[in-house]
Amino acid sequence: MKTKSKSQFWVSLILAALALVLLVLGVAGFVVRGSDRVRGLMDDMRAQAVLGAAAGSIIDQGALDTRKAARAYADEQKYSRNQRAAYVSEQEALYRAQATQRLLAFTEDQRQGIAPGIAHTDTLLRDYGALYVQEREAYALAWQEEQAAKAPQAQDVPDVEGALSEGGAMEEEAVTEASVDYSGFVPSPELQQREAAIRPAYEELFDLVNQALPDLPEGAREDLYLPITQTIFTPGDSFEQAYDRYAQASGEDILEGSGRFRMTIARNSSNWIALAIGLIILVITIYFYQPLVKRLGVPRLIITVFFLLLCVAAALYNIRVSGLISNVLWRTGMYGVLTLAMLPGIQSGISLNMGMPIGIISGLLSTLIALEMNMTGWAAFLFAVAGGILLSVPVGWLYGLLLNRLKGNEMTVSTYVGFSYVSLMSIAWMLLPFYNAKLTWALGRGLRQMHNMSGSFGKLLDNLWAFTIFGVRVPTGLLLFFLLACWLMWLFSRSKSGTAMIAAGANARFTEASGIKVDRMRLLGTTISTVIAAVGIIVYAQSFGFMALYAGPRQMGFVAASAILIGGASISKAKVFHVILGTFLFQGVLSLGVQVANAAISTGGLSEVMRILISNGIILYALTQSGGESRG
């Protein structure tokens, strides 16, 4: 057995020591947050920020007067246009620097003088904010239910043509339910009373501020209402958010010595802990590198560590990690059954089943029949699943017969067959006899491209037994369905037929010599893969909330293939574990990678670009692993 090198040991030891220091700093930061000293400093910072927000109006007015005077002087001296512009800018900058230094030098007595007014206003703002959020959420829920009951037509469904042609599948970043229209929101009498109570408190606070800053310009009482109240409190405030807001409004100017050190520790406590966790991950990876590689393989180890480090990076960028984990769990359940459809194809020897769209279209067709008959709830879901299975068996069998005639070229043939079948069905969607107005175009003949599932069985599994723990929403029903499908596939692999199918895929000549008909096993694996794909798209559609026809299913096989390869499978060997791990890692890296990249690079419109780069990069990486050695 290969022993650990000295460099491996010492690097691990140094990183572990650094992680321990950061962890101690993080814990200490959370402890000091609750101390009277830190609470007092936060109150002082808030008072300084309120005075700073008010002083800003004086500085702005003074800067305007300075610019006017500078222009007048420049015109009197007959400066050129460029000389005048440079002189005016120079004078304004000089004034702002001097005024800021003079006006923001508030004393402790001035801050303490407005503290009672801030505390009173803060209490009223918090009461108002809590009820406001509650009523807005209730309105949004009622509005969404009302929209679902209206059975939206084609114009109510988002355009996702670009999302269907990029990255291999529909993405929730590109397809979301319509934004809530709050134009009809009417505050309750109680909310109006709470809002009205804020104004007198603000008036009292403004009078106190005006005593500290008697040079406030005319109209400042109204102009400063929002800046001051938003400085005091913003809904959803965390310690870090409040600190940063106060610091931006000169609140940090009052910190010095031990007070600045305490506040720095308290502000960055979450970052210290996140960095410590990241270092611990690196320590474990470095110190136990050999056993981890032996157990997981290099590709899976890299992807797993990358996923964990993305979680750490998300925490450092103040992205709500619990929300990201919720999204990863949801995507895992949504895509899981589709990824599982790859398993029997690999095990039976046809390699990656890139002809998955054949099964997917069977599931879409059965779902359309349920929608045509206006079925809803569990009846619609079970009917769609049963219908998808019945429709996919014969087409899967015929598809298997074709692959048996073209052994050795299955991946290429299956890809062309899948694409061709999608194109053929694109014609069929325009000709099939569906008449329900919710499915067909408003003008002309044929089925619409997108169909909203909210009026049928949308989110049925997602909401079944769902719960939230530590801010992470767990779609219990969705995950249980995925795990149930995996368990059934695992049981089948332990049966006589399953064992024979796996043996045929592993060594066709030996299996044929043992009396097992390899072609029949290949047919069985292809058919099962097609059936699972039909069920998978139904689960996907109910979870995603929309069902896509025409080009929608074309690239989904690539996403499923990439996920199972990332999980450790090869084109000749795969297990249920590879499906579960691969789906989680693929969707996790894709989801977290986009969010962290957007936070790191503040460029508008980056989300879709990063989604394409990350998803296609992972797919390319996964496909490069398919040609290597088989991994257990």
Image (spheres, rainbow, N blue to C red):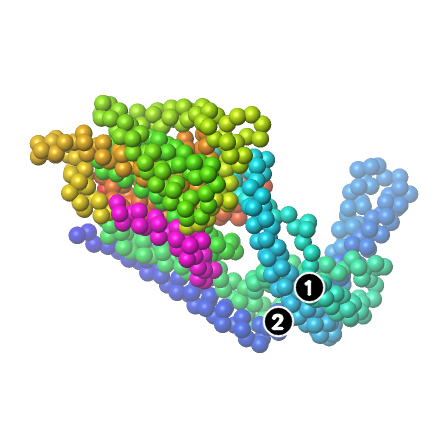
The quadrant the C terminus occupies is top left
Callout 1 secondary element: helix
In the image, farthest residue toward the bottom: 36
Q: Dot 1 corresponds to which residue? A: 191
| Up/down of 400 relative to 253, above or below | above
Residue 484: in magenta span: yes
Relative to 242, 379 lies left or right: left
Quick one: 380 or 536, which is closer to the camera? Answer: 380
Name the residue: 46% across, 52% down. 324
Q: Quadrant of residue 260?
A: bottom right
Confirm whether residue 456 shows in the render.
yes
| Residues packed near mark 2 inside 10 Å, few (<14), some (14 to 19) or many (20 plus) | some
**Which badge, 2 or 1, comes first in the chain's sequence?**
2
| Up/down of 568 relative to 98, above or below | above
Quick one: 544 or 262, which is closer to the camera? Answer: 544
Q: Dot 2 corresponds to which residue? A: 41
Quick one: 468 or 251, which is closer to the camera? Answer: 468
Magenta span: 462-489
